[in-house]
Amino acid sequence: MTKVKYYYDPETLSYRPIKITHKKRLSNIVLFILASFVFGLSSLLILLNSDWINTPAEINQKRALENYELQFDILNKKLNQIEAVVANIEERDNNLYRVYFEASPIPEAQRRAGFGGVNRYKDLEGFDNSELIINTVKRLDILSKQTVVQSRSLDEIERLAANKAALLEAIPSIQPIKNQDLTRMASGYGYRIDPFTKKRRFHYGMDFSAKRGTPVYATGNGIVKRADNRSSGYGRHIRIDHGFGYVSLYAHLNKYNVRRGQRVKRGDIIGYVGNTGRSVGPHLHYEIFKDNKKINPLNFYYGNLSQKEFDALLTQSRQENQSMD
C-alpha cells in the first residue's frame, strides 16, 4: 500500500496530502540514479587508486617490481665485491707490476673516469625506481671501462715483461775474459798515461792482459755489427749490438770466431786475445756504448764475478797507471 505523505497548511490549520505528479516522480528517480552513479564512480576511482583493492594484473605487477628491486639489490652487492677485486688488481698493477717494469702508474682519474657529454641515461628517467636503475647502470659502465683500462695495462705489462727478459739477456753483464785466464787487469776507465806519448789522456775502456790466443766471450746477447780492422787504433776488433742502445767493443784481437751479421749469446767465444792495432802487448781492450756514448764497463760485471772478485777489480781499475793502448 502506497504511503501518503502530508504537510501542514498554516492557512487552514490542517494537514493536507502531498500530491506528487508523474513528472516530479520521474525527475526524482533520474536525480537519484544520477547521484548514485556519480557516488559509485567516485568511490570506484578512489578504491582503484588506493592499496585497498588491486586487480590480479596489478598484484602481479607489484610482485614483479618487488622482485626487480630485490634483484637490483643483489646485483649491487655483487658489484661491490667485483669493484673491490678490481681495486685490488689496480693497486697491484700501479704499485707492483708497473713499478717493476718501470712504467708510469695509470692516474686514478683515468681509471675512474665517467662518461661526459650526452646524457646516456635519459631513457631511464621518470620511473619509480629510476635512481636505483641509473645508479646501477652507471656503476656497470664505469666498471666496464675500468676493466678495459686494466686489460690494456696488462697487455702493456706483458710487452714490458717480454722486453725486460730480452733486456736482461742483452745487457753486457759478464767479464769478457775469465778470471783464471787473466794475467792482470792492466788498466781501467778514466785518465791514464798513454804508452806511446807518455801523456795523460782519457782511457774509454778497460784493458785485460792475457796470453795471445786467450778466448774472448760475448758479454750479452746481440748481433755482430763489425768484425774487421778498419777502425783506427783498435786493430782487429768486434762490435756487438745488443739492442736497447747497448753496444760492446772488443779490440786488439788475434783472430775472430764470428762474422758480421751473426747472432751471438752471452758466453759465446767471439775471438781471441791478440796484439793488433795500437797496442804495446797482448791484451783485450773492452768498451761499452750506451746510446752512442762510452760508459764505464766496470758497472756491468755483476753476471760472473763474486763480491770479492769485483772489489779486487774495482781497486785495480781505479789505479791511474799506464794503459796498454
Image (tube, helix red, strand yellow):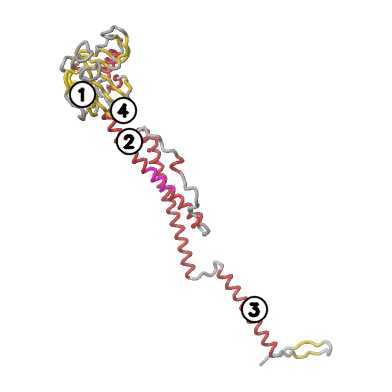
Question: Marks 4 and 2: which is nearer the front?
Answer: 4
- Residue 251 figure quarter: top left
- Is there CB contact under 8 Å for labels 4 and 2? no
Give the mark nearer the N terminus: 1 vs 4.
1
- Is there CB contact under 8 Å for labels 4 and 3? no
- Tell me the crowding category of disc 1: few under 14, some 14 to 19, or many 20 or more residues within 10 angstroms, Cα based: many
- The type of residue carrying mark 1 is Ala
Q: Is residue 9 left or right of residue 314?
A: right
- The type of residue carrying mark 4 is Gly
Question: Marks 1 and 2: which is nearer the front?
Answer: 1
The x and y percentages for residue 212 are 16, 15
Disc 3 secondary structure class: helix
The residue under label 4 is 245
Give the mark nearer the N terminus: 4 vs 3.
3
**Disc ID at residue 227:** 1
Give the mark nearer the N terminus: 3 vs 2.
3
> The C terminus lies in which quarter of the figure?
top left
**Disc ID at residue 35:** 3
Q: CA distance from mark 1 to mark 2?
A: 32 Å
The residue under label 2 is 160
The stretch drawn in magenta includes residue 170: no
Disc 4 secondary structure class: loop
Q: CA distance from mark 4 to mark 3?
A: 100 Å
**Disc ID at residue 9:** none
Pick whichever, 264 or 12, lies toward us: 264
Q: CA distance from mark 3 to mark 2?
A: 86 Å
Question: Marks 3 and 1: which is nearer the front?
Answer: 1
